[in-house]
Amino acid sequence: MKRKPIPEVEQLSAESVQLYGVLNNESDLGCVLIASSYLDYALASLLKRYFVESKLVSKLLDPPGGTVSTFAARSALAYCLGLIPKGLYRNLETIGNIRNAFAHSYLSVTLDSAEIAVFVDALIPPTLSHTIVIDNDVTHKGPQPMQLNGSNRERFNIVAVVMVNRLLVTGLSTKHLTKALKGWD
């Protein structure tokens, strides 16, 4: 089955508001499948934006035979190209594991199931830089991991949404690579 074409980063960014509603209203299975699919498209869109402009880009990114057509391959390539940090890459791997655990379960599982909860607990919260101002005195507390409270579902959604936002912001600020010198045309 051929997937729909890879959207531009701007389109995914505009549609991201709809994603938040879907993640909050779907079943756990729907939430995981949609979040991982959106992340997959965000990765593909980021790579498409980064690569040189060429017809070969679709050949690389489009399933089923594209060299970079899987979630795992796209995640690894984005990390190896320096487009995403290691923590985000690890979270992509973890969300891939969560998606696979749901997909390969023959019984109903939820984000609270023991086998899935282990993966949710492994999600790395984003790091935030804190600045404290007391009586006009500015104190930088430095990078701190975001506190993730709530249910497994809430924590999964928060991390997934922050990951989507990071990929989209990176994509929006990314320019195509320039082609190599001419001479072999």
Image (tube, rainbow, N blue to C red):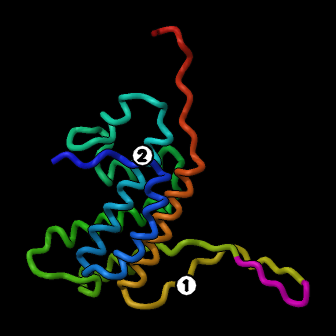
Is 106 left or right of 10, judged from the image as shown?
left
Residue displayed at 42% across by 66% down: 91
Q: In the picture, which quadrant includes the C terminus?
A: top left
Dominant secondary structure, magenta: strand
Span of residues in magenta: 130-136
Quick one: label 2 or label 1, which is nearer the N terminus?
Answer: 2
Q: Dot 1: few (<14), some (14–19), or many (≥20) neighbours within 10 Å? A: few
User: Which of the 4 image quarters holds residue 134?
Assistant: bottom right
Residue 150 at x, y percent in the picture: 44, 91
- Toward which corner of the image does residue 42 lie, by quadrant? bottom left
Residue located at (14% from left, 82% from top): 108
Q: In the image, is 147 to the left or to the right of 65?
A: right
Q: Classify 12 as above or below 110.
A: above
Residue at 44% across, 44% down:
47
Q: Which residue is mark 2?
A: 77
Q: Which residue is situated farthest in the left direction here?
A: 106
Q: Secondary structure at mark 2?
A: helix
**Residue type beneath disc 2:** Leu
In the rendering, at what x and y percent does residue 12 appear?
44, 57
Label 2 environment density (alpha carbons within 10 Å; few <14, some 14–19, many ≥20): some
In the picture of the structure, the residue carrying the numbered disc 1 is 147
- 184 or 90, nearer to the observer: 184
